[in-house]
């Protein structure tokens, strides 16, 4: 009798335990179901492109489970930060306030969306939330009437009214996607004077060379680095790639054979590298030991060395090869003179960062001509979100003059920026940059307000690398999750 009584008492408890386990499993399946999650994140408006929606859902399907876990940290009681902020700052008559609706932003990625009323001037889109910032029209007019200096601040999610649609800013969608890499893609570049040769390096030490001509394909995978690939550069004839890595080595690769033909060992992490634009027998590399070294491509020997004040994190040559422009971990920009025949280096100028908090430079990019500066210019981007635009005086040994700047949100990763070559022939000075919110943003540095003029959405992780091809009809972007998207610009008349 005792045994039967015990069995009768334990049976309901077992049933309850099984029911609890079933509920947990159902809740888990509901929360992390990739199909449900991807459809919720990418709804299908009536006027959207089915192919684009399908590609977005495919990408979100791959990132769904990790995406759910990430977003749990940003939610409280079912509401996120944007919802609380909008509720607190709502106007008194917010229930009767009419805000014009518009299609989902991902479905209109790369397309211009005119604003319909003064209220829409202050609508702010969130990367994962469609809630709006409900501020009154009077507050909007006050914000627009406020005068600002030429050096302006802007948010990555600045979605204020933009100019009328211009063909140069229209993207028809994704040209192709490379998702073979399973690690963060740290750097991406097109070949020298090439429109279809693309390469990217990742934190797993791999370098992948691709062709974006139809059909897109991966040509070679260059394996040899044991740690993160920090930078690489194509030779003038696109026959070789020189790469730098956290494993303290510089490697030279023969692309056609897919082989490493030379290894140069250092004593610290190699952070950036460039071929000399005139004499390809010279390789310039910056390292974590605060040095800029010039190597002989044929022998691997060090020809010249100069020292700066911080780790050399980014560099670029001018078109003549007479100057190297480099940035360090303290936010300073240096001009270094280089002899194209002997490779000898000498420091000429240093431009200190005006920011109180020193932040590493992630991008240094040279361009031969700008309508704004009427001469050569330099772009610098730091991890604290500072975009700086310099004019260069070649007669004064590469002296830099700050022409304009833009303050964006600080970056957690070493996100890069780039000039927009073709778009810069329009009025203004346009820059494209990645962002932590998985978007690609276009900025006009000459506009004191509303500097964000367009954005592309499609990545599921922070966008790290940015690169234009030589034909200026393709833009490549890479993200933290290892996906590379090549965007196709719309044809213009």
Image (spheres, rainbow, N blue to C red):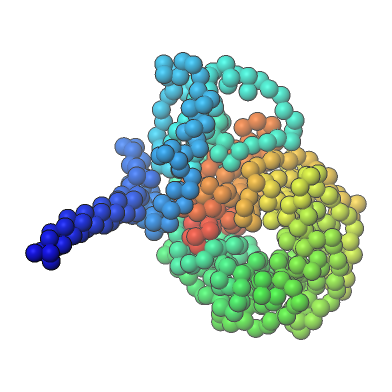
321 left or right of 166?
A: right
Residue that protrudes farthest toward the left in the picture: 1
Instruction: Reply above or below: 434 against 294.
Output: above
Name the one closer to the observer, 469 or 31.
Answer: 31
Residue 214: x and y in percent read 43, 63
Residue 11: x and y in percent read 16, 59
Residue that protrudes farthest toward the front in the picture: 2
Instruction: Pick the quarter of the image with the N terminus.
Output: bottom left
Q: Which residue shows up at 83% across the image and 56% down it?
A: 334
Q: Which residue shows up at 65% across the image and 46% down it?
A: 410
Instruction: Reply above or below: 156 against 461.
Output: above
In the rendered image, which quarter is residue 341 located in?
bottom right
Q: Which residue shows up at 76% across the image and 58% down it?
A: 329
Name the one closer to the observer, 157 or 14.
Answer: 14
84 left or right of 236?
A: left
Q: Which residue shows up at 49% across the image and 60% down it?
A: 481
Residue 164 in sight from this viewpoint: no
Q: Number of callouts in the render?
A: 0
Instruction: Reply above or below: 137 against 399.
Output: above
Residue 415: x and y in percent read 62, 54
Name the one closer to the observer, 350 or 26.
Answer: 26
490 left or right of 386?
A: left
Residue 376 in sight from this viewpoint: yes
Residue 433: x and y in percent read 61, 49
């Amino acid at each position: 009798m005792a045994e039967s009584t015990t069995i009768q008492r334990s049976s309901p408890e077992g049933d309850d335990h099984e029911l609890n386990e079933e509920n947990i499993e159902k809740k888990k399946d509901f929360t992390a179901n990739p199909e449900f999650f991807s459809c919720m994140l990418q709804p299908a408006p009536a006027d959207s492109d089915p192919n684009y929606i399908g590609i977005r859902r495919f990408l979100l399907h791959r990132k769904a489970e990790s995406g759910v876990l990430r977003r749990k940290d940003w939610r409280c009681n079912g509401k996120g930060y944007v919802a609380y902020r909008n509720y607190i700052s709502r106007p008194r008559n917010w229930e009767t306030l009419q805000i014009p609706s518009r299609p989902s932003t991902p479905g209109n990625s790369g397309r211009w969306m005119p604003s319909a009323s003064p209220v829409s001037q202050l609508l702010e889109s969130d990367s994962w939330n469609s809630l709006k910032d409900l501020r009154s029209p009077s507050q909007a007019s006050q914000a627009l009437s406020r005068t600002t200096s030429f050096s302006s601040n802007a948010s990555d999610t600045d979605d204020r009214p933009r100019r009328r649609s211009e063909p140069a800013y229209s993207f028809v969608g994704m040209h192709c996607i490379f998702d073979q890499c399973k690690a963060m893609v740290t750097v991406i570049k097109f070949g020298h004077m090439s429109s279809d040769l693309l390469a990217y390096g990742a934190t797993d030490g791999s370098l992948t060379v691709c062709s974006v001509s139809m059909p897109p394909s991966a040509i070679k995978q260059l394996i040899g680095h044991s740690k993160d690939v920090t930078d690489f550069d194509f030779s003038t004839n696109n026959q070789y790639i020189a790469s730098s890595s956290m494993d303290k080595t510089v490697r030279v690769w023969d692309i056609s054979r897919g082989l490493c033909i030379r290894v140069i060992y250092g004593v610290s992490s190699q952070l950036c590298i460039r071929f000399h634009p005139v004499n390809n027998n010279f390789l310039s590399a910056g390292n974590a030991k605060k040095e800029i070294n010039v190597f002989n491509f044929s022998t691997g020997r060090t020809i010249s060395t100069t020292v700066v004040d911080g780790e050399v994190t980014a560099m670029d040559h001018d078109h003549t090869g007479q100057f190297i422009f480099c940035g360090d971990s303290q936010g300073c920009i240096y001009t270094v003179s280089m002899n194209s025949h002997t490779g000898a280096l000498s420091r000429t100028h240093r431009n200190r960062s005006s920011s109180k908090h020193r932040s590493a430079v992630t991008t240094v990019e040279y361009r031969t001509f700008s309508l704004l500066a009427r001469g050569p210019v330099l772009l610098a981007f730091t991890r604290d979100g500072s975009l700086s635009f310099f004019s260069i005086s070649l007669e004064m040994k590469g002296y830099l003059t700050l022409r304009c700047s833009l303050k964006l949100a600080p970056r957690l990763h070493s996100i890069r920026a780039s000039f927009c070559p073709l778009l810069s022939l329009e009025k203004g000075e346009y820059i494209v940059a990645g962002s932590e919110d998985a978007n690609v943003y276009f900025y006009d540095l000459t506009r004191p307000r509303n500097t964000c003029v367009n954005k592309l959405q499609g990545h599921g992780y922070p966008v790290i690398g940015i690169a234009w091809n030589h034909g200026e009809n393709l833009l490549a972007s890479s993200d933290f999750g290892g996906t590379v998207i090549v965007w196709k610009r719309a044809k213009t008349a």
